[in-house]
Image (spheres, grey):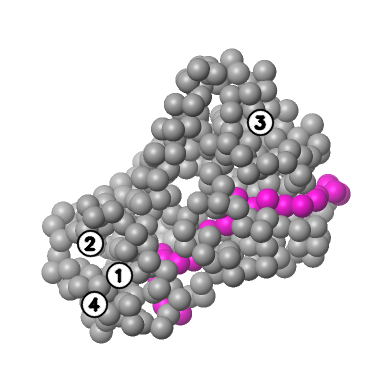
Amino acid sequence: MRDLSFSDLPAQVQEVAAQLGLTATSFPNYVATQRRRLAERIIEGSAEHVTYYVLQSRRFTGLEPIDPVRLAAQRATEFPEPVRARFADFQAHSATVPDERCRLVRRLFLSLPEAWTPEACFRHTMQFLARKGPQAAQRPDRREVLDQLYQQRGLSSDTAPEQTRGLDEALRWMEQSRTAGGRTLLVGPGLDLTRREGFSDAIPLTAYQLDRLLAAPRIAGAGIDCADVRPEVMAHLSTRPLCALPLDITTQCTATPGQYGVAIATNLLLYFEEAPLLAAMAGLVQSLASGGLLIHNDARFATKVFGELLGCPVVHFQPLTTGQRGAVIQLDRLVIHRKG
């Protein structure tokens, strides 16, 4: 991998890039600022994972689990005693728990800066859940509100089995369109480490997207590389027989242009505002061979425009439903670009 530079943006993109504040002069400052913010967002994501685990796991304590979503709906502003007691048990006993998930979460907790106390982790997580809660779900502009929220949210490794629905549809489309494929780059594969609801210690420690691709003979046979910035995901990938790249796609790109037939960035691009989104898409498109596919689920108009400017227009768009949570139908999208 190598650092992105302004020259990695094709000439036809540079006018739009300038409107977003990306110029030859400003690009080094963009990279420095983006990396500082990336480090902050990794910390914020770790705080969420720690809080979800501490509130719900039974591995390190005999205390009753606490539902994070229900607690956030109560607009908890203080540090409740039951939560304080669970954090105390986690700090006292988690080191002796012979469990891989507990070990990873403890490592995340110990990696947090001093200011990120148990109370700070809890408050940060409750604020996010409150902003994402029922009131946001009922708004007519729900999609736009959630998009803005995720563009500011800490980077997590959230994933769930239903997120492979988009991959299944993408693989079906590739088969029907007789796309040649090639080596695949899976960016942000995720890891089912913790959940804000429906968590159980019995849930396998799984990267569902990666497992789905490995189960597709055509994809697995051509080879798969994975890239991520979350420490627990990189730790998990190191146990798999594949190449794991510590790649920040908003400031870095793969070292060899045109080496992939498919690049997948599901549940990732939607974390970026427009300037880092353009930089990330430019690097991903550069990594694709001619005719290669960029697959994601970000339906913003910007991804369509940026794809066209980068010579990688959208060739398939498909709305998806991935299930139902309470009374709310869970919606997703499949977006496929092809590099010309």
Disc 4 target residue = 92
Mark 3: secondary structure:
helix
Q: Amino acid at mark 2?
A: Pro
Instruction: Using the image, determine if residue 280 lies above or below residue 39.
Output: above
- Residue 236, magenta (yes or no): no
For label 2, the residue is 118
Q: Dot 4, how many residues are within 10 Å of its Cα: few (below 14), some (14-19), or many (20+)?
A: few
Mark positioned earlier in the residue sequence (3 or 2): 2
Percent x, y of residue 157: 47, 57
Residue 225 point in image, percent of width and height: 68, 55
Q: Residue at 59% of width from left, 15% of height from top?
A: 15
Point out the frontmost of discs 4 and 2.
4
Q: State how far apart marks 3 and 2 are (Cα).
A: 42 Å
Which three-letter amino acid code belongs to the residue tagged 3?
Answer: Gly
Q: Is residue 55 left or right of residue 229?
A: left
Q: In front: mark 3 or mark 1?
A: 1
Q: CA distance from mark 4 to mark 3?
A: 51 Å
